[in-house]
Amino acid sequence: MINKKEIDPIIVSVIGNRFDAISKEIGQTMLRTSRSPIFSEARDFVTAIFDKDLRLVAQTAYIPVLMAALPYAMQNIVKEFGDDIHDGDIFILNDPYKGNNHPPDITIAKPVFWNKKIEFWSVSKGHHADVGGKGVAGYNPEALTVWDECIRIPPARLYHKGVYNRDVWNIIMANIQLVSLVEGDLHCQVGACNIGARSLVKLIEKYDTDIISKALQRIFDASETQMLSMLKTVPNGKYSAERFIDHDGIDKNKLIKVAVTLEVSDRSIKFDFSNSDQQVKGYVNSTLANTASSSFLALFLCIGGDTRLNEGALRTIEIVAPEGLVVNARAPAPVTGCTIAASQAIIEATWLALSQAIPDKVDAAWGRWCAPATMGVNPRTGRPFADIHFMAKGGAGASKGLDGWDHLGTVCCAGGLQSPDPELHELVTPYTVLNCEVWPDSAGAGQWRGGFGTFHRFRVDADNIQAANFGGGVSKETAPFGLSGGKAAPHHELCIRRNEEVIKVDAESLYQLEKGDIFEMYESGGGGYGNPFLRDTDLVLRDVKNGFVSFEAAESEYGVVIDKKTLTINQKATDEQRQGA
């Protein structure tokens, strides 16, 4: 530990905030220079800074499920190149068996030198519109191996001593369809890392490496102390739970179990996934990096939210996931669906386990993600496009004292997934948005109800559009659960309307869309918290007046009888309904 007298605590705070700001600066650069709406609108990326010892210094988790996987990627890059790392080098990695979450999330890392030695790393990681294979915007629900999903990029140099490594770029571009989008977004990441590196050099120039090193030690120790303080709010013991993935896209009648046992002590928390199912044929298998990141996210959403997620915070957490399980697949299993399907099950299982210990700090389940990625040619522009339908989002689960948020998106993103502007969406894709509205009665009832999901419907205005519907939550077993007497939300319902035909849309499935097709998505809300008959009757009336809760649901779910003509509460009938329950 560093003696407090060795460095001014104000300087420690200034340096810590500066690292956070540089991480955000990398992200803001990506937002302003990207070519794909997956970056510029949905913000499906994460940025970070590591020190020379590969300790996580700071990060900005625009998509939080990516937040704790970067240390695995960085360890593999340095393991591959060892001492053969030079000023001006920039590295790339997407191989899920070399530390990445899943193939579409490409890691770009730039070492930052000072006095001919590495002092820091400037890093960005984001979801690309195309990574090869047979997928749609990176998703191939029919994949049986990782080679069906992508071009695997092990740790490699995009730039060597500042020189553009054209051979590596050409190999990547020769294996993808959407060259302009991917090339543009890779340059966007490279530029962002250069900006981060420049700011890190300025920080070193101002404070020198010795002061920064001491400040970092203090920052790490403070984060560890904060996490230990948070852990003490969880009673020591073992807590177990399980949740399920709908299916793997291949064996569509088989639920897949994700089981976790949390072992909590004053000094650490261990996530043990040993009782989970074996890895499966389809692409919902999780990498170890993704399982670890999902576990950290689940914990930080309950406790530790005010703690900087850095090396110090991570010291308190241990992951046990034996190789060969669905939570730590063995190569060459396909894994692209893991950041959604597996992550959602991991987070939900962790929350159910934690609810046994700290029910007042755990959310009911959020609506899972289940919507298509699409790809084709936009006849309006003559250009190829790739899109993920981020307007179709579910609701968040309720918690003690708070209703869930509406239209917030999958828990993997923790509210960080932004919806595109419908008009801009129509400009860059061959679609017309027909509906994007609240789905009434989609929230789980409770003393505090879940957030509402959405009804999203769009018309296809071009032929030969590939669609990969990915995610989960389409079955009763995977619908958002309630807590402490709160009720579950309904499961998703999706279909394609083609003339008079109605085609049911399943999770983890490929579809071909044609001009005139209408894609409909009813996305579930979040689970409820607490006995619904204890909900304030005026709040139920408000939701009925707003069209969010039906008269029938108000009576059956909440015990509130409302006169349809006067829109007032029949207090006598309500008292009888609630007392008779």
Image (cartoon, rainbow, N blue to C red):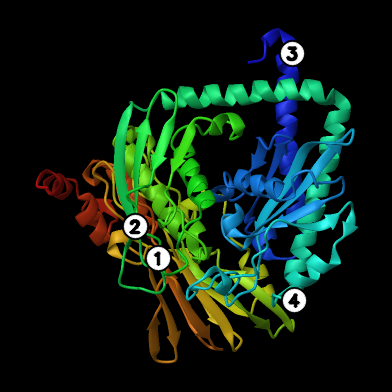
Residue 174 badge? 4
Q: Identify the residue at image location x=31%, y=29%.
A: 237
Mark 3: which secondary structure? loop
Mark 1: which secondary structure? loop
The residue indicated by pointer 2 is 277
Q: For the residue marked with disc 1, what is the amino acid?
A: Val
Q: Position of residue 229 (x, y in %)?
A: 47, 22
Which residue occupies the foreground of this view, 228 or 572? 228
Q: In this orientation, does residue 321 appear? A: yes
Callout 2 crowding tier (Cα within 10 Å): few <14, some 14–19, many ≥20: some
The residue indicated by pointer 3 is 8
Callout 3 crowding tier (Cα within 10 Å): few <14, some 14–19, many ≥20: few
Which residue occupies the foreground of this view, 222 or 381? 222
Q: Are marks 2 and 3 in contact (CB under 8 Å)?
A: no
For marks 4 and 1, the one nearer the N-term is 4
Q: Are marks 4 and 2 in contact (CB under 8 Å)?
A: no
Question: How far apart in space, not on screen, are marks 2 and 1 (Cα)?
Answer: 8 Å
340 left or right, relative to 82: left
Q: Identify the residue at image location x=20%, y=56%.
A: 556
Q: Identify the residue at image location x=27%, y=44%.
A: 537
